[in-house]
Amino acid sequence: MNMAMMRLRREDPRVVGSFRLHRRLGAGGMGVVYLGSDRKGQRVALKVIRPDLAEDQEFRSRFAREVSAARRIRGGCTARLVAADLEADRPWFATQYVPGPSLHDKVADEGALSSAEAAGIGAALSEGLVAVHEAGVVHRDLKPSNILLSPKGPRIIDFGIAWATGASTLTHVGTAVGSPGFLAPEQVRGAAVTPATDVFSLGATLAYASTGDSPFGHGSSEVMLYRVVHEEPHLHGVPDALAPLVRACLAKDPEERPSTLQLSLRLKEIAAREAQDLGEARTPAPRAAEADRSTGPLVDSHPGRQRAGHTEQARGRRRPPGSSPGTPAPRGSVPPSRGGTSSRAGGASRGGAPSRTGGPRPTPASRGGSRSGSGSRPVRRDGAGRTGPRGTSGGLRPANPRLLRQRLIVFVVVTLLVALGIAAAQGCQGPARGLGGEGQSGPEQRHAAALAAEPPPPGRQ
């Protein structure tokens, strides 16, 4: 049934019961559905039965039984029955209006649904059928056009022509009521309907939602009904996650089909798994540059360097050459793991001071890692293969102990030589003045005494 809104035609009634009609929602084999509203403004979907069926007393009696059964249906997956008039010249009933497109229109406009969407809709529909069957009703015309996709979930509509459990599906001999391609084989044969009948129709509906086509193809009503009874369904295009379950629903024998409760539980599992797989597939992988920056080991600027026990390169974490715990690591480096072996023998403490083993304080390495900022010099190594410290330059390079010792020795020697020179000069000055005093007399002696009384020139003691 096409549920697109259309203007009222000249032959359409304007008022039915206490409801005012506004638009046509669609027309089907059993009658016309209108959009109406009551005096309070509540919108309803009102269906008026065709005049020729209204003359059929058998149909009237069955229609009355099914409307009574529809009143007992409880659950959020159906359109609630609002009112009905079984004694009118043309019987009618009104259900709660459900906004949203039908499953048929959605697939026709947007294409087949994903496995997660189809399984989610199927789980909600099978759960709704559990409540329908508990009320003793079989829908027997479940199809994509009778499923509305409301913002609150799918809703099953058109219960006014549903049959009670065990009722025949024929209004007249040889005439099946329903939609070819979605009818169960027992409906075509005229056998009694059961909840398994709706399971078959739900399986055909899920196949349509997944492929955009009926599992029994197209053709005349006779051809379609023959295929339903004698041929296997075509499920090419149904996702692998749904295909086995859909095939089980479309079994020719009603006893071989799953129950609505089993179907609901199984479809919920499939919907959850498919939604999770879809979310993982949409999660972007980390970019290579970010992965390298966060996990990639740095290139060793001293290829020959080894460490006692195990190398930090084997651990996948290494501090860049020349960095210290108190100095931020260059971009792209990875901090050493806790409890890992230090990469420096006698390394600096947290405060940056040399450790007790006499190791020099490390300084940040240059960008290249193998050369300093002012030049390069071969790196001396001790007997254990560890990198030896280098001389300092403006406090930016580690001090060389050997160079310090050499400079200390030179400083001590120079200091001693200067001291000896000063002492020798003082020793020579004293005897000169004494000798002069002995050989002078008279004015010369007084002149010498005056000279001795004057303060010594600067630099002499």
Image (spheres, rainbow, N blue to C red):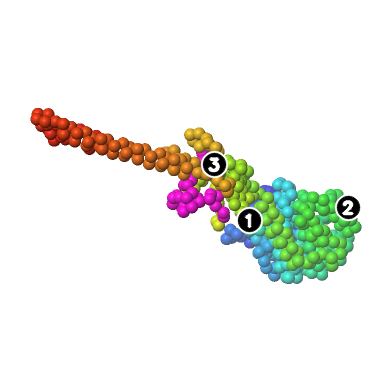
Mark 2 nearby-residue class (10 Å; few <14, some 14–19, many ≥20): some
Task: Write down the region rendered in magenta.
Answer: 340-369
The residue under the point 78% across, 54% down is 240
In front of the other: 350 or 81: 350
Please check the rendered image and state whether residue 351 is part of the magenta-colored stretch, yes or no: yes
Q: Which residue is mark 3?
A: 380
Pick whichever, 339 or 188, lies toward us.
Answer: 339
Place of residue 191 in the rendered image (x, y in percent of width and height, measured from the top left): 86, 66
Q: CA distance from mark 2 to mark 1?
A: 37 Å
Q: With 392 as the anchor, is 204 left or right in this view?
A: right
Q: Is residue 300 left or right of residue 81?
A: left
Q: Percent position (x, y) of residue 71?
A: 69, 68
The amino acid marked with disc number 1 is: Pro
Up the image or down, 137 lies above or below 275; here it is below
**Which numbered disc covers residue 151?**
1
The residue depicted at 79 percent of the width and 63 percent of the height is 199
* Residue 437 % position (x, y): 16, 34
Number of other residues with Cα within 10 Å of mark 1, as a class: few under 14, some 14 to 19, many 20 or more: few
